[in-house]
Image (cartoon, rainbow, N blue to C red):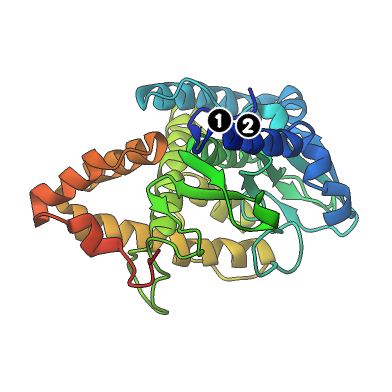
């Protein structure tokens, strides 16, 4: 990988672009240092994903290998031949405080208001921070294949983030040398900080928030790849426990579960806040063409060109439907 990810774009004068590139280079050259893993997570030990994958064996290695091939084919079909480099994925594999690792592990007990403590992809460093699935107390081992299933789910999801279109320019903050992310996939942000779409009302069962839509779309793709890998390798769903719910979550069949552990509580929040609203949105807006709408969203999110998505909506609902559906009244210059 160079300094920029496959679908990132710099805007401005040549000098401004050089400043942005230099700044990103400082953050991305040594992601372990700039992510401040030791400072933020002193109770966790991290290794890179390529090290974890090299140690997978049995059902875990089989399902992950099958899924990786499926993921490469899926992304290639979307015009994206590159995947997130595994050496830029930092995985928590041990903890002084126990807990349960995996896709819905929060890494820390509390999430910061700006979500910087949350696991997943960090676009400034072009790296991801996740954890290996399983009970970190060492008292129980996950069912065969579960570590591979959960890792595949997380990795494909973060590949989607890595491949998302982003447009940068110098921002007004940080003495005039900050980086302003003016476009992120199908969403936009003014220098003032206002975003194209607003938060959904509390209690909403569907969504018109473009961030939720992209996150939901990424998880549909990740769980589809994982489901196909599970089918290809013949792996069965564990009968009970967190493994049972984590398996269903990874293959896109999650339902809210009794919150008997923080991992399940986090999963429930994701189902309610991302999966369910995105599914409802596809049904409401896409109808019988919901799968096609999903494909159009994924393509636009990666290439940053909204023309096809806007045309798709206009053909069904009339001119200006993208604006009507998503534009917030707070989105001003």
Which image quarter: residue 197? bottom left
The number of numbered badges drawn on the structure is 2
Residue 182 placement (x, y as % from top left): 47, 50
Left or right: 237 in relation to 277: right
Could you classify mark 1 by the number of other residues whose Cα lies within 10 Å: few (under 14), some (14-19), or many (20 or more)? few
Q: Which residue is mark 1?
A: 14
Residue drawn at (76%, 67%) of the image: 109
Residue 310 placement (x, y as % from top left): 21, 47
Question: Is residue 85 depicted above or below 118 in this figure?
Answer: above
Residue 255 visible in the current orientation: no
Q: Are marks 2 and 1 in contact (CB under 8 Å)?
A: yes
Residue 60 visible in the current orientation: yes
Residue drawn at (84%, 41%) of the image: 33
Could you classify mark 2 by the number of other residues whose Cα lies within 10 Å: few (under 14), some (14-19), or many (20 or more)? few
Q: Which residue is mark 2?
A: 18
Question: Is residue 83 depicted above or below 119 in this figure?
Answer: above
Picture quarter with the N terminus: top right
Q: CA distance from mark 2 to mark 1?
A: 6 Å
Question: Is residue 123 depicted above or below 213 in this figure?
Answer: above
Classify mark 1: helix, strand or loop. helix
Residue 61 placement (x, y as % from top left): 64, 25
Residue drawn at (65%, 62%) of the image: 115
């Amino acid at each position: 990988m160079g300094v920029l990810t496959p679908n990132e774009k710099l805007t401005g004068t040549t000098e401004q672009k050089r400043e942005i590139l230099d700044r990103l280079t400082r953050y991305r050259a040594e992601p372990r240092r700039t992510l401040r893993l030791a400072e933020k997570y002193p109770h966790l030990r991290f290794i890179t994903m390529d090290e974890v994958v090299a140690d997978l064996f049995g059902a875990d290695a089989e399902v992950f290998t099958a899924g990786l091939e499926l993921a490469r084919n899926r992304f290639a079909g979307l015009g994206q031949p590159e995947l997130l480099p595994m050496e830029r994925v930092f995985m928590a594999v041990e903890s002084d405080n126990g807990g349960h690792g995996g896709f819905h592990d929060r890494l820390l007990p509390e999430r910061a208001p700006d979500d910087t403590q949350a696991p997943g992809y960090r676009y400034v460093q072009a790296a991801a921070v996740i954890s290996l699935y399983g009970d970190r107390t060492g008292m129980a081992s996950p069912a065969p294949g579960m570590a591979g299933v959960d890792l595949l789910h997380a990795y494909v999801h973060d590949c989607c983030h890595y491949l998302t279109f982003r447009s940068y320019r110098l921002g007004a903050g940080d003495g005039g040398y900050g980086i302003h992310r003016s476009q992120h996939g199908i969403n936009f942000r003014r220098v003032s900080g206002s975003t194209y779409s607003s938060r959904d009302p509390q209690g909403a069962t569907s969504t018109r928030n473009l961030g939720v839509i992209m996150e939901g779309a990424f998880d549909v793709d990740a769980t589809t790849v994982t489901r196909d890998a599970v089918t290809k390798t013949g792996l069965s769903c564990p009968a009970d426990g967190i493994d049972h719910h984590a398996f269903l979550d990874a293959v896109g069949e999650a339902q809210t579960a009794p919150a008997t552990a923080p991992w399940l509580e986090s999963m429930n929040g994701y189902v309610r806040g991302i999966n369910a609203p995105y599914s409802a949105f596809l049904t409401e807006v896409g109808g019988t063409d919901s799968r096609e709408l999903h494909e159009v969203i994924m393509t636009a999110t990666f290439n940053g060109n909204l023309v096809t998505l806007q045309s798709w909506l206009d053909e069904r609902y009339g001119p200006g439907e993208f604006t009507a559906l998503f534009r917030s009244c707070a989105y001003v210059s």
